[in-house]
Amino acid sequence: MAELGLTETVGILRQPGVRPRRSSFGLGWEQLYLSAQEEQPYRAEFGPAPTHLLILHLSGPVTVRRGKGSGVRSRAVPAGGLFLQPAGRTLDVELGDRLDTIHAYLTDEALRDANDGRSVELSEELGATDPLVEQLVLALEGAVRHWEPSARTYTDHLTGMLAAQLARRHRAGALEPEPTGGGLSTRQLNAVRDLMEQRLAEPLPIADLAAAAALSVSQFTRQFRASTGQSPHQFLLGLRLEQACRLLRTQTSPIAEIAVECGFSHQEHLTRVMRNRLGTTPAALRRAG
């Protein structure tokens, strides 16, 4: 089986505004091509690709539109958001602003291997979140960044886990059930999460969150906890911590700046929350990569 490379991207990574940082080319990967890059705004149409495309946003939120005519979808996709394009379909897409991404081009064979040999039809997704997929893609990018031949078994294992998660959680028709027990609908919860991610660094009154769900404050607080098991403040703190972890792994900005950018009062606040929730510190996380 041949190594995957740029030909699997049907021109997506050959856009004039794409500035590549690193890729898996030359490492012998046969079921996955991975590329990390900076992308400038563009609009283009790409022909059907032989591989499934998964894009992880490392920065944001950035507005992305896909489709055309009556089928256009648009969303402000935050850092950590996913873009999923199944193989064999034409892609019409517009990127509204500069964006840091990791692209993973996965073969259909990898999906079938992860699904007991049965074919899998993936869904088209825009702005979905999946912490496991995010961590797997980041781990694969880290393996590319610090490549050594002995890591091949490890990356093959990560590729299989990524394919299995896509086959299990992101197949066509695998819709998330609406919550029961008086919780928020999926639409309401997505609207609230979008607002939190857009205003991550700002003080965010609970009245604004309730308005995004079209509920009173008391209704919203009760239904949000029923859906997530957390208060809105606890949930928002978790999003801020996730973003801080991403920036610590991918940027060299001072820890104090990252803390404020992610909505923490100061570096000590970030350190306290990270130690309580993750058992580590910003400096230790950054050293671990």
Image (cartoon, rainbow, N blue to C red):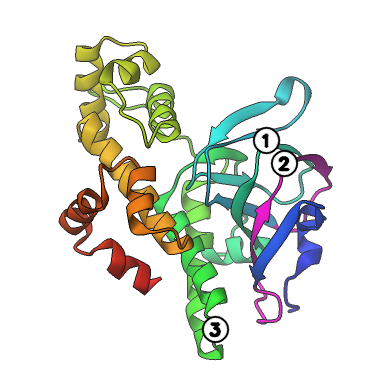
Label 2 sits on residue? 41
Q: Is residue 154 above or below residue 59?
A: below
Label 3 sits on residue? 152
Q: CB under 8 Å between callouts 2 and 3?
A: no
* Residue at 73% from the left image edge and 31% from the top image edge: 67
Q: Position of residue 167 (x, y in %)?
A: 52, 53
Label 1 sits on residue? 96
Cα separation between marks 3 and 1 = 36 Å
Q: Is residue 3 above or below residue 212?
A: below
Label drawn at residue 80: none
Cα separation between marks 2 and 1 = 5 Å
Q: Which residues are magenta?
A: 24-51
Residue type indicated by callout 3 = Arg
Q: Position of residue 36 (x, y in %)?
A: 62, 62
Choose the circle earlier in sequence order: 2 or 1: 2
Q: Is residue 173 visible?
A: no
- Of 12 and 117, nearer the camera is 12
